[in-house]
Image (tube, rainbow, N blue to C red):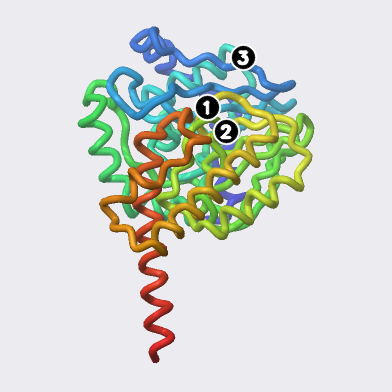
Amino acid sequence: MPLAMAIAAFAGVAAGTVPLAGCAMAAGQASATAPQAVEVAAGVYMVQGAPGEVDADNLGRIGNAGFIVGPNGVMAIDTGTSYRHGVALLAAIRRVTDKPVRLALITHTRQEFLFGAMAYREQGIPIQMHRKAAGLMVSRCDRCLKTLKQTIGEDAMQGTAMFEPDAKFDQPYTVESIGRPVQVIYFGHSSGPGDVGVFDAISGTLFAGGLLDQMRIPDVQDSDLEGWTKALQALHELPIRKVVPGHGPVAPASVIASNERYLSQLQTRLLALLQSGAALSEVPDAASLPEFARWDQYETIHRRNASILFVRFERQRMFERAGQQE
């Protein structure tokens, strides 16, 4: 179904005639962790996730979410880790405004941004994803969901299920339905296939999704390094004043450069290890990057990043050598 038709199909329900049933219940059940929206610019709100890895204490709520309020409604950005998290995020929106939520856009395929979608779906709010991100979700997220239930518990994940986006898109576009033009930006395969950002030109605020993290190690698992580098270069061209990263606190535009430095130093270090003949087992310890040692998940994601990229570079070198021999 075309994007415009899919959104229009939900217009009557998303216009606010359906109450946000269940919000009070979920907020009460998780009162200790009820998310609070912080206004980072006029009409632009962030709900910050917890630091660290997914575990039972943080209920897996480690990813940032947010929303933009326009004259005609609200655009929600990312939907949280679970059905109950999604309900709590909707309650956070309701504490700010009673305007209808016109759409929920999921920026990338990570479990902490995806699985609250069913809470939005039950309120008639259309869920949007890039087609490639949706494809990646289908290919692996049944397994992600099972792991989440094992990690944070069946009760915390009650009501959480896989879903199909109501609208998929392939190209960048501008959201008009909230009465405030918001750009959905896409640079091709970068931090992941189908990873997008959301730029509110009025305030100069970028919701970076998987493209940027603040004081947290970026995850290269789904990345195309060359494409990611080009995407970050393109971000420098936007008049960005504030960044809501995928993880971590709100940041200035300089967060783009800090992520670039990490990816550049990581690549340089691993290529040097490959050239020196290092074994894969040595790589996590040998790939230390002191500048980033205080970033969240340095001891976990950084070590995994090093192994992932080392294997990629090793395979690339093997293919290049095989090609030279032909």
SS class, disc 1: loop
The residue lying at 56 percent from left, 60 percent from top is 226
Cα–Cα span, label 3 and label 2? 21 Å
The residue lying at 48 percent from left, 36 percent from top is 290
SS class, disc 3: loop
The residue lying at 24 percent from left, 37 percent from top is 147
Quadrant assignment for the C terminus = bottom left
Provide residue 307's location: percent of width, then percent of height: 34, 51
Q: Place residue 109 in its image quadrant.
A: top left
**Residues tagged 3 and 2 counted as in contact (Cβ below 8 A):** no
Apparent side of residue 171 relative to residue 90 in the rendered image (left or right):
right
Q: Which numbered disc covers residue 96?
A: 3
Provide residue 293's location: percent of width, then percent of height: 46, 32
Please determine whether, in this image, residue 193 is positioned above or below residue 197: below
**Residues tagged 2 and 1 counted as in contact (Cβ below 8 A):** yes
Q: Residues within 10 Å of mark 3 (few under 14, many from 20)?
A: some
Provide residue 35's location: percent of width, then percent of height: 48, 16
SS class, disc 2: strand
Provide residue 285's location: percent of width, then percent of height: 33, 43
Q: Place residue 51 in its image quadrant.
A: top left
Q: Amino acid at mark 2?
A: Pro
Apparent side of residue 197 relative to residue 132 in the rendered image (left or right):
right
Q: Mark 1 highlights which residue? A: 248
Q: Which numbered disc covers residue 130?
A: none
Q: Mark 2 highlights which residue? A: 245
Q: Amino acid at mark 3?
A: Val
